[in-house]
Amino acid sequence: MANRTPIPTNNSALIAMIADEDTVTGFLMAGVGNVDLRRKTNYLIVDSKTTVKAIEDAFKEFTTREDIAVVLISQYVANMIRFLVDGYNKPVPAILEIPSKDHPYDPAQDSVLSRVKHLFSTESVASGRR
Amino acid sequence: MGLWLEPNSNGRTYCSSLSCNFRNLPQVQLRSRIVDTPISNRRTEMTMERQQREEEKKPQTSENDKDEKVVQFLDSLNDYLTLMDSLSSALRQGWLELASARHSMGSWRINSAILDHKFHSASTTLQLSSPDDSNYNMKQPHFTLRKWESCDDEDFQSKEVKLDEDEVQKNSDDVQVQKERSKTLLVFGALVSPKLRDAQLSFETALETLVDIANRRSVMLSAYDHVREEILGTKQ
């Protein structure tokens, strides 16, 4: 079981982002941007020209790097690679689906809530919050 | 209302009835209820009664544990959804302020093309720890946000100060944080719109909310695993 693997501690882990330009710019202003010596960044800006393959590669890279503790991904981007996001079950890095400007957060599509919805009916998680 | 077995100093057990039905019994009948039993037998009976009572309590205790786990899961789920609403509000405010800054400064000054691609470390990072909860077998990650921490080691060492210098240290920390904030905005030019600074603060708030969400997520998944184990265990 994935949760039984030991969780490595880290005093300065990074926050990775896969989101639209405004969201990434905003969080970069908050100081989370990191560029290493090989000019690899901890973020991917998704626009109309970004391919699904590029998003998949970025997701796989961020979830395998040991220096990343949290991956923020816009929910509409996560929907493009839903099979990858739902198939991910490690505790670290934590995958957090965030809203974007044009796509508000939908609890029914959240992969974490989808995992726990088996204890409830599919309607009760989303309906009561609106 | 019923019969109680009570020992007396002679090691004899007797029945003292609390029921009104026995009040009218003649004395002879009441005396016939006094039973002479050896002390060891009486103690064995009391031990067996105590064991029976403890066995009856065990299913209740395990039921309470199950309920506690379910309540913890539901609480963490509720917190997760509430924090998501807060995150949405903080992000909406940040996007609005960013749009206002772009409107006043010009879209050519605020876009992804001018982002810094030179080597630099993140000023805001996470501390990842794994608190060992003795009640559970599984460890869950815990995230702590570390905002605007300089790469300079002297800043970390200087935080261990005497009580008298706390206020001075706090002021210097605030100044350091302001310097880091301004340094980050230098990418957009020396003079930036106040709305851009407001957007920076909104996204910092969103970041703090995200760390709380990450912690709630790990608690929720851990509680879910425990509840699922209980359900599977019950079915077997």
Image: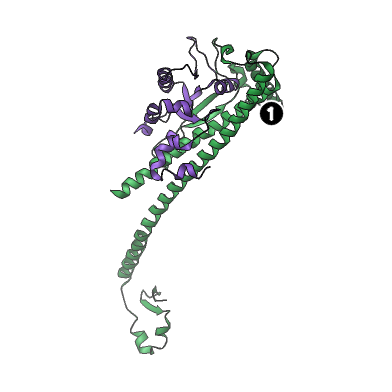
From the viewer's side, name the closer residue of A31 and B174: A31
Q: Residues within 10 Å of mark 1 (few under 14, many from 20)?
A: few
Image position, residue B113 (x, y; %): 57, 12
Image position, residue B186 (x, y; %): 65, 14
- Residue A93 position by quadrant: top left
For the point 53% across and 32% down, the residue is A104
From the image, state the color of chain B. Answer: green
Whether residue A93 is visible, yes or no, is no
For the point 44% across and 49% down, the residue is B68
Image position, residue B146 (x, y; %): 57, 26
As drawn, the residue found furthest toward the left would be B236
Q: Tag 1, which secondary structure?
A: helix
From the viewer's side, name the closer residue of B236 and A118: A118
* Chain coloured purple in the rendered structure: A
User: In the picture shown, does residue B233 fall above or below A68?
Assistant: below
User: In the picture shown, does residue B101 fall above or below B59?
Assistant: above
- Residue B229 position by quadrant: top left
B219 sits to left or right of B95? left
Whether residue B214 is visible, yes or no, is yes
Q: Which residue is mark 1?
A: B166
Image position, residue A84 (x, y; %): 38, 26
Chain of the residue under the numbered disc 1 shown in the image? B
B124 sits to left or right of B46? right
For the point 67% across and 20% down, the residue is B103
From the viewer's side, name the closer residue of B21 and B89: B89
Q: Quadrant of the N terminus of chain B?
A: bottom left
What amino acid type should be assigned to the residue bearing mark 1?
Asp
